[in-house]
Amino acid sequence: MVTLGCTRNEVDSEELAGRLASAGWTLVDDVAAADVAVINTCGFIEQAKKDSIDVILEAAEAKETGRTQAVVAVGCMAQRYGTELAAELPEADAVLGFDSYADMSAHLTSILEGERPAAPTPGDRRHLLPLTPVERQAASARLTIPGHGDHVGAGQNGAGERHTPALPEGIAPASGPRVIRQRLEQRPWAPLKVASGCDRRCSFCAIPMFRGAFVSRHPDDVVVEAEWLGMHGARELFLVSENSTSYGKDLGDLGALDALLPRLSAVDGVDWVRVSYLQPAEVRPGLLDAMAGTPGVVPWYDLSFQHSSSAVLRRMRRFGGTEPFLDLIGSIRERSPLAGIRTNVIVGFPGETEADVEELTSFLSQARLDIVGVFGYSDEDGTEAESLDGKVSEAEIADRFAEVSELVEELTAYRAQERIGEDVTVLVEEVDEGEVVGRSAHQGPDVDGATLLTWPTDRARPAVGDFVAAQVVDTEGVDLVAEPR
């Protein structure tokens, strides 16, 4: 199984792996040693789609040289393009959508027997659930939503009472929580899905169309999976969704995340809880209080600003602007002065002017953000922005991307230097002969930089998954260099 794209896709792959393991399949590391190669694709932006196709083609080559008999595309790109992808990419023996996940073993078996299951027809999955969020929980039980276990609302029966879902034997230890999941990465952190889908209508984003309307997982189901992850080596839980600030609105409780955080931080084996994908327009003071005041919830804020010009944001169908965003950052730092704050921004959006770019760079200069992802705008199939006027030329987008990226590199390196002298706690992720590398609490996994520990030669090295108290003594770009206490 090969996973492309975001951490939400990683959760989906681990659920698929759990389903397949329970049905007798064996996971192998080398595609040439597999009967079936399952490619969990990403359909977010053009480069991600190209990468997905390249991996499918590479896996298909193994049919000529190795044991592989079939290559199956699943995931976001498969769901988004379905029959179109199947017609244009014959190297894939099947293209399967989200509704196939619950019966994946049967589908793979039929493919090996020479059948070709029907690919999903492209469509807007938001229409599969009621428009009103509070009506969704019962209706969503009819759907397969990746990363939500056996079915959505598995922790409740029709009367709203808790019950234990009937799951296949062997998914998890009989003495522990029953979870449909198999860990694919032996690292000391794990993504944990709290919700799927999105109700926002950002004009540049296609995700809601193929992921569907927003659906929260029941808090009890999230805690059960957290307990299972704690039993399987996850010292840090990375809470993921398309929009974590909406968590609980379809459960009738906008404070559900505030109440969930203490339950997750109390799970045996778990030391850190990290919340991702916060929409600035939906961040409530109560959530900030809960994040800053709950022991174990790390001071890390993943805020999706996308721009700071109010004119551009309105065309994006988003809210906010420079002053509201700076006020939000100030509110966070009042509660947690050493917090790590990251964001993404898009340059070259239709209608963006030089004055808008200047406002964005001014905002970034004032915000003192730890990490900023910069993206050049590109049209996405089926989105409102695709038909907007005022398109910026590709050459100008490239120039603006280079300008903002260069500024961001300087600003984030300077922000890292501001942390020299800080005391940090580091989660160790790699121990090689010459290096001990991990992340401080304000650094998110994979894309937020790392902390290099200058380990004394006369001191026993830590193991992966250990926490080390240290002090920052130097920086390398956004990366920190720290000495253990």
Image (spheres, helix red, strand yellow):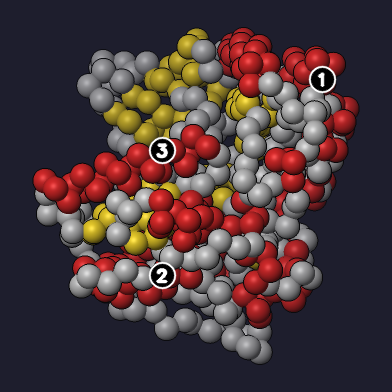
Q: Name the residue beneath numbered marker 2.
A: 118
Dot 3 corresponds to which residue? 51
> Where does residue 201 sit, x and y in percent of width and height?
75, 51
Q: CA distance from mark 3 to mark 2?
A: 24 Å
Q: Position of residue 281 (x, y in %)?
A: 81, 44
Q: In the image shown, does 114 or 142 lie closer to the viewer?
A: 114
Query: Distance of mark 2 from mark 1, alpha carbons?
Result: 46 Å
Amino acid type at mark 2: Ala
**Residue at the spot x=34%, y=65% of the render?**
18
Mark 1 neighbour class, 10 Å CA radius: few under 14, some 14 to 19, many 20 or more: some
Dots 2 and 1: beta carbons under 8 Å?
Answer: no
Asked whether, in this view, residue 182 is left or right of residue 200, the answer is left
User: Which of the 4 image quarters holds residue 137?
Assistant: bottom right
Residue at 52% across, 13% down: 477
Mark closer to the chain start, 2 or 1: 2
Give the alpha-carbon distance from disc 3 to disc 1, as whole Å.
31 Å
Residue type at numbered disc 1: Thr
Which image quadrant is residue 358 in? Answer: top right
